[in-house]
Amino acid sequence: MNTAMFFKGLLIGLIMCAPVGPIGMICAQRTLAYGAAVGIASVLGAATVDGVYAAVAGFGVKIISDFVVSEETWLTIIGGVILIALGLRTGFKQSVTPEERPQGKSLARAYVTAFLFMLTNPVPMLMFAAVFAAIGLDGGQGAYVATVTFVLGVFAGSSLWAPLFVMTLSIFHPQLSPGQLNIVNKIAGAVIAGFGLIVLVVTVL
């Protein structure tokens, strides 16, 4: 394995894939409302998409990349609608006790919903395409191993945010009362829905 290329990918993953914006708000709200396990599952769902898009950009999977680019507007609109719906649902969600926190299949649902939401955002793939062009990787036969190593590094760097992000937020969770958690839900819901509305307005106009 090309260690230098792996650590380049790791650094890119840490820098480019930080859970900020609406996905960061979603992961933060889930961590505070349902605990660390659900938060980690959500961040890992988003990180998986980063890895997928990095692989698509690195190996030039033409069918997928062409589809994402050609349907960018519709994917963005779908993402905006999902954000608004998720924001409204979050805003009206009541806090739960530790005994009521989702387990088992609900952890899988947290992972899948975060994955699907991130999948509607084509920006990461375009960013990774620019990164691959900048470092001179095209996924060709001669660069196959280097590309695989770089993509693995990106996924590892993106995944590192799960424990870092969630452990930081988990410090505050025991100090929040159910009423305060309800306020967090309402604020998070308003912000998430606001992001979705902005995305729709900017895309349509």
Image (cartoon, rainbow, N blue to C red):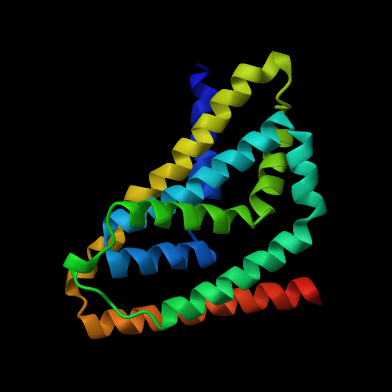
Q: Is residue 123 left or right of residue 176?
A: right
Can you give x and y, in whole percent of width and height, for residue 112 in the image? 47, 52
Q: Is residue 38 left or right of residue 191?
A: left
- The quadrant the C terminus occupies is bottom right
Q: Residue furthest top?
A: 142
Can you give x and y, in whole percent of width and height, for residue 3 in the image? 48, 21
Tally of numbered tags: 0
Can you give x and y, in whole percent of width and height, for residue 9 in the image? 54, 34
Q: Is residue 92 left or right of residue 79?
A: left
Q: Please report the residue visible at 76 percent of the width from the left and 57 percent of the height from the top.
A: 72
Pick the front one: 157 or 100: 100
Q: Please report the residue visible at 51 percent of the width from the left and 72 percent of the height from the top.
A: 86
Can you give x and y, in whole percent of width and height, for residue 24 in the image? 46, 62
Q: Please report the residue visible at 35 percent of the width from the left and 79 percent of the height from the top.
A: 184
Q: Look at the image and tell me whether residue 8 can be seen.
A: no
Pick the front one: 133 or 191: 191
Q: Look at the image and tell me whether residue 171 can be seen.
A: yes
| Image quadrant in which you'd find residue 75 | bottom right
Q: Residue furthest front?
A: 105
Q: Please report the residue visible at 56 percent of the width from the left and 45 percent of the height from the top.
A: 50
Q: Is residue 165 left or right of residue 197?
A: left
With respect to residue 188, does 107 lie above or below? above
